[in-house]
Amino acid sequence: MCASAVAPREAPRNSAPTRAGGPAPLYIVCSPSRRVGKTLVARFLTEYHLADGRLVAAFDLADEAPQLTDYLPRHAAAADISGIHGQMALFDGLIAGNEMPKVIDVGHRAFGLFFAIAHKIGLFDEARRRGIEPVILFMIDPDPKAEKAYSLLRRSFPGTSLLPARNLTVAKGLRYGDAFPHASTLAASLEISELGPPLRSLVDRPGFSFADFPQRPPAGTRVSAKARDELVTWIRRLRFQLREIELCLIYEQILSGLR
């Protein structure tokens, strides 16, 4: 872990910010539990924007390998909020400018501290005043502490979009229900389909790119046509869901501007 957040490197040279007056969301991908697919979602979110030629800032608050910075070293920055200087660097950076989306991978050890600080400084209210819309993507799981943490976030951040994200690898059969109610005006959700062990092993390899795979499977990797089609379908399905969330954010911004 570095002592403070460092600005992620810029997107490839042929990329350009294409915000076009739309919202610049602040995505907080989080869970108080381990191994629920949190970093997978943060990776995909970051690559989702990069694949469309858009700038995105990604921050890594996890401390277990493989981390977001292992997968996206050119686009993600490690952050440490255990000290005041690291806290100031990260939280000031999250609301400095609204020209690009930001993605934060909040590890299970940093979960409590991150949201305690966010609540104390009014991070999400200040973000909205600057045209930055916070979206909390909470990875649900059967552990009772997940339900308790979700309920605490609902009470602590009323008015902030809190979306339960279900990774079917760990939460199959787990209903949102009363435990993880949809707490947002956004009419969208996130559900990550299961992948078989061989494909999961492939996407977990550092260097694997969701954006590149449909056109260029990893060099030196033998993937059957059936497996390739399965993974391409999985990627397209998740991209579609993220697009829905983004469109809902744009719709909410338009409505807000008319009020």
Image (spheres, rainbow, N blue to C red):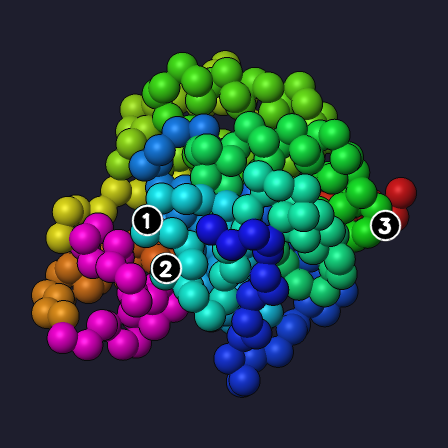
Image quarter in which the C terminus is found: top right
Give the spatial CA distance, label 2 vs label 1: 8 Å
Badge 3 element: helix
- Mark 3 Cα shell of 10 Å, populated few (<14), some (14-19), many (≥20): few
Q: Are marks 2 and 1 in contact (CB under 8 Å)?
A: yes
Vertical comparison of 127 with 100: above or below: above
- The residue under the point 14% across, 70% down is 221
**Residue at the disc numbered 3:** 257
Give the spatial CA distance, label 3 vs label 1: 43 Å
Q: Main secondary structure of the magenta part?
A: loop
Is 211 covered by the magenta stretch?
A: yes
Give the spatial CA distance, label 2 vs label 3: 40 Å
Q: Position of residue 192 (x, y in %)?
A: 36, 43
Q: Position of residue 16 (x, y in %)?
A: 62, 78
Residue range in magenta is 199-220
Q: Position of residue 60 (x, y in %)?
A: 49, 51
**Residue at the disc numbered 2:** 70
N-terminal label among 3 and 1: 1
Q: Tell me: 71 left or right of 150.
A: left
Q: Tell me: 68 left or right of 85.
A: left
**Nearer the viewer's eye, disc 3 or disc 1?**
1
- Mark 1 Cα shell of 10 Å, populated few (<14), some (14-19), many (≥20): few
- The residue under the point 50% across, 16% down is 148
**Residue at the disc numbered 1:** 65
Vertical comparison of 214 with 97: above or below: below
